[in-house]
Amino acid sequence: MRLLIVSHTPHYRRDGQPVGWGPTVRELDYLAELFDEVTHVAVAYDEPAPASALAYGAPNVRFRPVPPAGGDSLRAKAGILAAYPAYARVIGDELRRADAVHVRCPANISLLALAQLRRAKQPPYRWVKYAGNWQPEPEAGEPWFYGLQRRWLADNRHRGVVTVNGQWPGQPPYVHSFYNPCLTEDEAAEGSRAAAAKRLGRPLELLFVGALNEGKGVGRVLRVALALQKQGMACRLRLLGDGPDRPGYEAWARANGLRDVHFMGWTPRAELSTHYAAAHFILLPSRTEGWPKVLSEAMAFGVVPVAAAVSSIPQILAAAGAGVALPPDDIDGMAAAIMRYAAEPDVWSAAARAGVEAARQFTYRHYQQAVAALLAEAWGVTLPVPPRATPPAPAPSQPSGLNGHVSRNGHHSL
């Protein structure tokens, strides 16, 4: 079976071969094991690839590039309209060749793909992944076309199935709750071993993993650490990731006397596991999310999340019994939650164990089985799920999700 994927995942060239945003490439490598041929239509940038980019390991993935378009200025946004005819030709050509299509939303190119699917006769099997917040709060401040894509998907204008993060009231039968994969079987096993040996001690080890910006809540992370320091709690904060706002955050930490805070920069996957193994809590007070992969990565290592109550985060943490979700600006509440855990180590240990167990649902093996079940339920299609999840040969460096790289429009890289 031939699968077409349409996404805004940023791609580049390294040593003559295409490389893309690491977490998506890892996911698509495993997805490719279920199909005979996979074609990925996505944007390609004519500039050096960031360290977070990976080459495809699956031999049956063909990358078909389209030029980038969009941005923050009015001129850049007008460039989207100029790029659409070229996008439409490429997508239309590939739709006619494919047996199944997988569109990854929200993104400008995905909006066009959805519009084309309204009228296209091929392919018969259509699956859209909505990676953002399926039911955002009014103050989320997301781009207008996110809401447009959600409305089209809720109305089933693409005539297929949709997978989303979380379970929502009034969810129609063609909208399925799905877990966002990020772990190999080996990584899940490594995390389980590390969690079994972990104890809650002093200083408390706090961790942030992601792009250093206010959307991800880095300023709020620093204020939580400062609130703990003012209450006399010994803690060490490590921030793994990078971004243009980093010097400002470093200056704020110095000006406010925040001690034992370490800006680690972009961190390769192998080193990231070491930080997860050492951490007691992961902080992620984002303004908007779907389900952040860094939470499930951390949970696999027994790290307890203290995160924003946005999108599916409170649902998944409550169901797992792992961590707490509070409003993004509730600095005092997050600090108080950490203090309560510190006063009751047994409660923290129970939350850590629950997180390890829940993280098993975020393995690529589980993802492959879920995709196969999705297509079987919707269309009676049988996909050849591998007997065990053997990862394709990766590029030398394997960065984690959201670790210091964001898409060009500042939103989801899919």
Image (tube, rainbow, N blue to C red):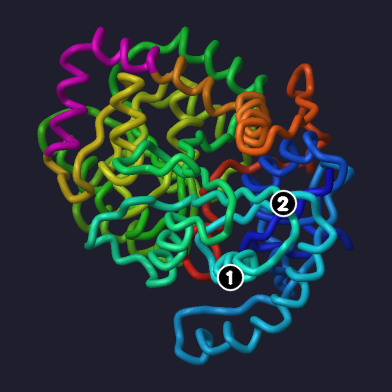
Q: For mark 1, does the 10 Å Cα neighbourhood hold few (<14), some (14 to 19), or many (20 or more) residues?
A: some
**Residue at the image point whose x is 23% and y is 28% from the top:** 234
Q: Amino acid at mark 1?
A: Ala
Q: Quadrant of the C terminus?
A: bottom right
Q: Which mark is residue 115?
A: 1
The stretch of residues the image draws in magenta is: 333-354
- Is 180 on the left-hand or right-hand side of 147? right
Q: Which mark is residue 124?
A: 2
Residue 338, x across and y down, in percent: 21, 28
**Residue at the image point whose x is 44% and y is 25% from the top:** 299
Q: Specify which label sits upstream in the sequence, 2 or 1.
A: 1
Tell me the mark number nearer the camera, choosing from 2 and 1.
2
Q: Nearer the viewer, residue 274 or 341?
A: 341
Q: Quadrant of residue 362?
A: top right
Q: Is residue 158 above or below residue 204?
A: below
Q: Nearer the viewer, residue 240 or 356?
A: 356
Residue 45, x across and y down, in percent: 70, 72
